[in-house]
Each structure stands twice: as structure tokens, then as C-alpha cells.
């Protein structure tokens, strides 16, 4: 995950990441929420997240320990 986010934020220069996670994938939903991703919307099957660069900078060291 950290390698992917390094690519997105530092190599490609994005300031946000948008992605979806199936609602029944509770471990992944919990992981993303723990590190600062925000649910922006949802439907019957998915949560839609936004993860900002500022939260990645704050939490990237903790991601290694997770």
C-alpha cells in the first residue's frame, strides 16, 4: 500500500486518492479509516473514499507497522 501511495502522491503528483471498497470487506474499510481516508458516499455494495496527501504524510510511518 505504501508503495502505491508513494507513486500516486510523489511520483504522479496527485493530492488526493479516490477509491471504493466493498462494504463487507470490513478489515480493509477499517484500515483505510484508521489512516485518515474519508467515506464520501456509499451505495448498496460499496463505500467510496477520499484519501488526501496531508493524511498520508501524517500516517505513512504508522502504515509500515500495521
Image (cartoon, grey):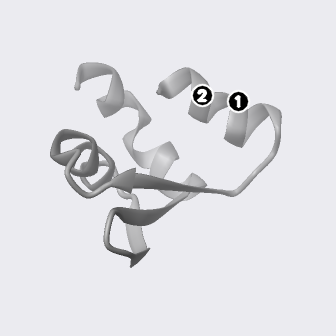
Q: Quadrant of residue 16?
A: bottom right
Give the alpha-carbon distance from disc 2 to disc 1, as whole Å: 5 Å
* Residue occupying the point 38% across, 42% down: 59
CB within 8 Å, label 2 to label 1? yes
Q: Nearer the viewer, residue 59 or 22?
A: 22
Query: Which residue was labeled with disc 1?
Result: 7
* Residue occupying the point 38% across, 29% down: 61
The C terminus, quarter of image: top left
Hey, which residue is sitting farthest right in the picture?
12
* Residue occupying the point 33% across, 63% down: 45
Query: Which residue was labeled with disc 2?
Result: 4
Q: Is residue 14 left or right of residue 28?
A: right
2 in relation to 25, above or below: above
Q: Is residue 30 left or right of residue 15?
A: left
On the image, the x and y values in percent for residue 3 come to: 57, 21
On the image, the x and y values in percent for residue 58 come to: 42, 47
Query: Badge 2: few (under 14), some or many (20 or more) residues near its Cα, within 10 Å?
Result: few
Kind of element beneath mark 2: helix
42 in relation to 29, above or below: below
Q: Nearer the viewer, residue 25 or 57?
A: 25
35 in relation to 45, above or below: above
Q: Is residue 27 left or right of residue 58?
A: left
On the image, the x and y values in percent for residue 35 come to: 32, 48
* Residue occupying the point 49% across, 26% down: 2
Q: Quadrant of residue 15?
A: bottom right
On the image, the x and y values in percent for residue 34 come to: 24, 50
Tag count in the figure? 2
Kind of element beneath mark 1: helix
Amino acid at each position: 500500500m505504501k508503495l502505491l501511495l508513494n507513486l500516486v502522491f510523489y511520483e504522479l503528483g496527485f493530492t488526493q486518492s479516490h477509491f471504493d471498497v466493498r462494504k463487507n470487506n470490513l478489515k480493509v474499510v477499517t484500515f483505510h479509516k484508521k489512516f485518515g481516508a474519508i467515506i464520501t458516499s456509499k451505495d448498496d455494495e460499496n463505500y467510496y473514499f477520499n484519501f488526501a496527501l496531508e493524511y498520508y504524510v501524517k500516517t505513512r510511518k504508522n502504515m509500515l507497522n500495521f
